[in-house]
Image: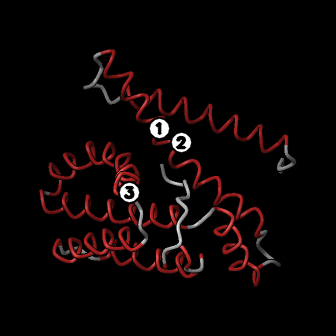
Amino acid sequence: MIGVFHPGRSIVHRAPALVKLGLLAVFVTVAALVSSLAWLAAASVGVVLLFALARVPARVALRQIVPILWVLAFAVPVQVLFGGWEAAAVMAVRLLVAVALAALYTLTTPVSETLDAMQALLRPLRRWVDADRVGLALALTIRCVPLLADLVREVMEARRARGAEGSLLALAVPVIVRALRTAEHLGEALTARGFDD
């Protein structure tokens, strides 16, 4: 799942977190702006090469991509219906590239380095921005993405077992309820640790 560090000594692992964050932002922005399938295919090959350079096992890399396939299973047919197959393919590849790059970042960068990088980045703004709280928000985001993906997967499996696969309502309601319940527990935990404002 996203947010799980995979130790290693590759050049990708050793690169400073701020550099990796900057490159991640640039590459995801470029992928979002490019609408050529040929360029996006080249970007996909580049992502695969980066995973190889980082020496991340294929099994670990694929585990990072599987959760987004559930989203694409719903989004691609809708996009084909309203925008055509090419728009659906561009959207799917963009999303896969972005998720894979984010996964590569989290697999090769410990959360502590990410938080330190964010604090260093925000230090000049400390008069207006609480870098510790931004770091905490980033850490929670990194942790909540796989948590939400797991919630969706569990609800889809339960929905399939009940024979309610065609109902979007049977997916959305339990996911929203469980996500809100999880957020409430997280808020209580933060309050107990002094983050109550």
Helix, strand or loop at mark 3: helix
Callout 1, which amino acid? Answer: Asp
User: How many residues crowd around disc 3 within 10 Å: few (fewer than 14), some, or many (20 or more)?
Assistant: some
Corner quadrant of residue 153: top left
Image: 44 above or below 163: below
Name the spot of residue 101 as percent of width and height, x first. Answer: 41, 67
Seen at 32% across and 42% down, the residue is: 70
Helix, strand or loop at mark 1: helix
Helix, strand or loop at mark 2: helix
Reading the image, the residue beneath label 2 is 147
Frontmost residue, 74 versus 13: 13
Name the spot of residue 91 as percent of width and height, x first. Answer: 26, 61
Image: 32 above or below 80: below
Reading the image, the residue beneath label 3 is 61
Frontmost residue, 98 versus 100: 100
Frontmost residue, 120 versus 85: 120
Mark closer to the chain start, 1 or 3: 3
User: How many residues crowd around disc 1 within 10 Å: few (fewer than 14), some, or many (20 or more)?
Assistant: some
Callout 2, which amino acid? Answer: Leu
Q: Are marks 2 and 1 in contact (CB under 8 Å)?
A: yes
Reading the image, the residue beneath label 1 is 150
User: How many residues crowd around disc 2 within 10 Å: few (fewer than 14), some, or many (20 or more)?
Assistant: some
Q: Are marks 1 and 3 in contact (CB under 8 Å)?
A: no
Image disc number at residue 39: none
Seen at 57% across and 55% down, the residue is: 142
- Please state if 5 lies on the left or on the right of 127 as rendered: left
The residue most toward the top is 162
Seen at 13% across and 62% down, the residue is: 86
Image: 41 above or below 82: below
Q: CA distance from mark 1 to mark 3?
A: 17 Å
Q: Nearer the viewer, mark 1 or mark 3?
A: 3
